[in-house]
């Protein structure tokens, strides 16, 4: 069981989380729990680091931000004991959950589930601080990147071969789209790992992307559900599993969107071997993630236009890198836009249906929405459009693919 920040926001909420745990114990299950920090706590800790120094040391950042989860793990163990249960808290290094040394966004290298499993013999509930690990050689505390306690939970579930990993949050499952934008969005009963991975990568914020990757590789069944449900009578949530577990299939499962996109266009680039490398290698070396790429096939074959997108936060850096290399890349002008949004439709059914994206292009054009760029893969397509049309585009696609629930 994993409880996110809003589910442990204060001692009352932690008591409520404990009731959910007790229900599972009373049903005869062996339970390990992973907790986030109280909501807002990690932001506060990050803020203090920034206040301390603009050039803070990343390993000290990790020592500081990992502390939020230590508090909630201890508090949950206390209230579980008050309910008459056997429980103890664990810090990441005590498990240990081992990671690499990429402080601030470390990757898990291995988890020893042994101590947690040993505790089950005396019906002891392990309450594990999420988000954190240990780099073995340096002996330093690491953190897994924002939202990382989802990944802690899935990885621990894999390590102890749990039947399920229930992710308790403040929504009652995964929705067909963001309910704040699409009022007729519906909760999905079941989603495949691949669909969830796309949805999380394309803007749905319910799970950390990496946690879904780990779940998919280790086949850990996930359930996204709400801690705000009555602990005595919880709703089922959304099951994320293998394709075999998911029976009825819609062509499109969900519509995601991300405002965190910026577009760059190089006009009249020399059209010869090596130009794409000349543009994208320096960006890659600067760790800038390029997403959509469009290269126009020119008819005179001497110059071409290249358009691509980067995360908004990287826009200025990407632009500066390209401006510096204007002579060596050899382009006429560099244009950019930050008021763009990427809208995506995801569905495993796209593999076996043709014309799914074409329908969307038509529907968007009928609403007067211009498409700046398109990308597709086996189970999704994305369009880049003007940000002003976000709501209209998302709602249009949501209706188009029959996802609208009762108003
Ligand atoms: N507390 C951490 C964060 O806010 C990790 C998490 O909650 O998943 O990013
Ligand atoms: Mg989270």
Image (cartoon, rainbow, N blue to C red):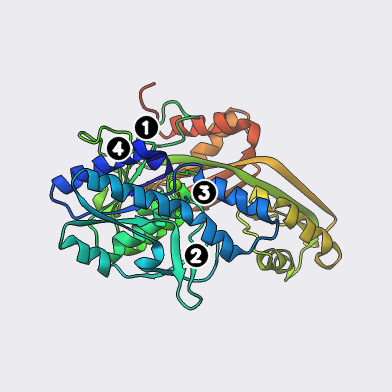
Which percent across, then down, holds residue 50? 65, 52
* Some atom of ligand 1 lies within 8 Å of the CB belonging to the residue at label 3: yes
Distance CA(mark 4)–CA(mark 2)? 29 Å
Q: Residue at x 79, y 57 (%)?
A: 320
The disc, 1 or 4, on the residue closer to the chain's N-terminal end is 4
Of the pair 208 and 146, the residue shown nearer to us: 146
Distance CA(mark 1)–CA(mark 4)? 26 Å
Q: Which residue is mark 4?
A: 16
- Marks 1 and 3 in Cβ contact (< 8 Å): no
* Some atom of ligand 2 lies within 8 Å of the CB belonging to the residue at label 1: no
Q: Residue at x 37, y 39 (%)?
A: 11
Q: Compared with residue 6, is residue 95 higher up or lower down, i.e. above or below?
A: below
Q: Residues within 10 Å of mark 2 (few under 14, many from 20)?
A: many
The disc, 1 or 3, on the residue closer to the chain's N-terminal end is 3
Which percent across, then down, holds residue 378? 45, 54
Task: Tell how many labels.
Answer: 4
The disc, 4 or 2, on the residue closer to the chain's N-terminal end is 4
For residue 79, the mark is none
In the image, taking residue 21 as reference, residue 177 lies left or right, namely right
Kindly report which numbered mark, 1 or 4, lies closer to the viewer in this rendering. Answer: 4
The disc, 2 or 1, on the residue closer to the chain's N-terminal end is 2
Which percent across, then down, holds residue 37? 44, 48
SS of the residue under disc 2: strand
Q: Which residue is mark 1?
A: 186
Q: Which residue is mark 2?
A: 142
For residue 42, the mark is 3
């Amino acid at each position: 069981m994993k409880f996110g920040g809003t589910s442990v926001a204060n001692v009352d909420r932690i008591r409520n989380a404990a009731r959910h745990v007790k229900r599972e114990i009373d049903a005869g299950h062996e339970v390990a729990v992973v907790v986030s920090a109280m909501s807002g706590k990690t932001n506060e800790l990050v803020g203090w680091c920034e206040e301390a120094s603009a050039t803070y040391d990343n390993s000290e950042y990790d020592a500081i931000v990992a502390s939020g989860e230590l508090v909630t793990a201890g508090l949950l163990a206390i209230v579980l004991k008050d309910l008459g249960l056997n429980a103890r808290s664990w810090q990441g290094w005590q498990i240990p959950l081992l990671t690499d040394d990429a402080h601030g966004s470390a990757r898990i290298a291995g988890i020893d589930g042994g101590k947690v499993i040993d505790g089950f013999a005396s019906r002891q509930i392990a309450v594990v601080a999420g988000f954190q690990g240990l780099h073995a050689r340096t002996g330093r505390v690491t953190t897994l990147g924002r939202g990382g306690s989802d990944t802690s939970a899935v990885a621990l579930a894999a390590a102890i071969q749990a039947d399920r990993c229930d992710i308790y949050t403040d929504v009652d499952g995964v929705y067909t789209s963001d309910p704040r934008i699409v009022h007729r969005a519906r909760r999905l009963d079941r989603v495949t790992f691949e669909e969830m991975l796309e949805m999380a990568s394309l803007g749905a914020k319910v799970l950390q992307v990496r946690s879904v990757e780990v779940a998919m590789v280790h086949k850990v069944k996930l359930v996204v559900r709400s801690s705000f449900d009555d602990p005595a009578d919880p709703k089922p949530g959304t099951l994320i599993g293998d394709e075999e577990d998911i029976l009825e299939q819609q062509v499109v499962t969900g519509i995601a969107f991300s405002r965190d996109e910026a577009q760059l266009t190089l006009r009249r680039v020399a059209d010869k071997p090596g130009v794409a490398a000349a543009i994208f290698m320096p960006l890659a070396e600067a760790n800038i993630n390029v997403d959509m790429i469009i290269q126009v096939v020119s008819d005179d074959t001497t110059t071409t236009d290249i358009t691509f997108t980067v995360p908004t936060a990287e826009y200025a850096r990407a632009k500066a890198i390209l401006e510096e290399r204007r002579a060596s890349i050899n382009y006429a002008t560099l244009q950019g836009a930050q008021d763009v949004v990427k809208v995506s439709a995801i569905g495993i059914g796209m593999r076996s249906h043709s014309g799914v994206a074409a329908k969307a292009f038509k529907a968007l054009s009928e609403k007067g929405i211009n498409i700046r760029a398109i990308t597709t893969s086996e189970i999704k397509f994305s369009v880049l459009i003007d940000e002003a049309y976000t709501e209209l585009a998302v709602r249009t696609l949501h209706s188009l693919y029959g996802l609208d629930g009762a108003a």
